[in-house]
Amino acid sequence: MYRKAIAACALVVSSAAVHAQGADAKAGWYAGFDLGRSRLGLNGNDLDSAFANQGVGTSSSIDNTSTSYGLTGGYRFNSNFAVEAGLTRLGEFDYSAPAAGDTISGKYKANALSLAAVGIYPLGQAWSLYGKLGAARTNVDLDASSATGATPVSNESHSGTGWLVGAGLTYDFAQNYYAKAGWDRYADVGDAAITGKGPIDLYTVGVGIRF
């Protein structure tokens, strides 16, 4: 399913680039703010594997939803194509991991810096569909503490690069202002041996301004 999503967004982006027709009234720089909910695609077993590499046996559970927010900025070359960068807080996910008379607890924190090509398909004067395909540099912090202090456990971090794919809808409610609703997926977040690894999906709404 994920490969199909990448292929579909790649088709939207490439088609928009091919059919782009020079500069127009919508060309120029833009910036926006997004707010939404994130869903983490890993479970307690993934955390158990990470803690096992610290020599700690656990039976973990994790809250897979959190709040996300981020800033985006980019350049729209014409009505059909843009390049966009983003700085995004992917979420802070609480977990609990009982371990032999003790409990390990903390947060799985994730952030991303991304760059993507955006293909845009206008539906009229105000509405547009978009597809996004790019790469993201993600950082994960697995904060961990022992309830009793008796279990030796440490905080872990991991940075890596993975695919970013997304899609959504925008609405121009004024000449230079727009609103949007969208979905983004960040693949390969974290490391299986260090922090636990899985994708994160964002479901967001946002507003922006064109300069």
Image (cartoon, grey):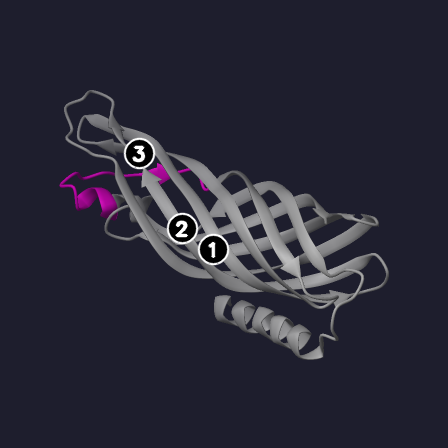
Could you say which is closer to the camera, residue 136 or residue 56? 136
What label sits on residue 158 in the rendered view? Answer: none
Q: Earlier in the sequence, mark 1 or mark 3?
A: 3
The residue indicated by pointer 3 is 143
The residue indicated by pointer 2 is 138
Look at label 1 and name its amino acid: Tyr
Write the start and end of the magenta stretch as one range. 49-64
Q: Main secondary structure of the magenta part?
A: loop
Furthest residue in direction bottom, as rendered: 18
Q: Are marks 2 and 1 in contact (CB under 8 Å)?
A: yes
Residue 101 in sight: yes
**Eyeballing the image, is 91 above or below 12?**
above
**Eyeballing the image, is 99 above or below 33?**
above
How many dots with numbers?
A: 3
Task: Name the residue located 18 percent from the left edge and 26 percent from the top edge.
Answer: 101
Q: Are marks 3 and 2 in contact (CB under 8 Å)?
A: no
Furthest residue in direction right, as rendered: 125
Q: How much space separates mark 2 and mark 1, taking CA atoms? A: 8 Å
Q: Earlier in the sequence, mark 2 or mark 1?
A: 2
Q: Secondary structure at mark 2?
A: strand
Q: Nearer the viewer, mark 2 or mark 1?
A: 2
Task: Name the residue located 37 percent from the left edge and 46 percent from the top edge.
Answer: 139
The residue indicated by pointer 1 is 186
**Residue 11: x, y in percent?**
61, 75
**Eyeballing the image, is 202 above or below 4?**
above
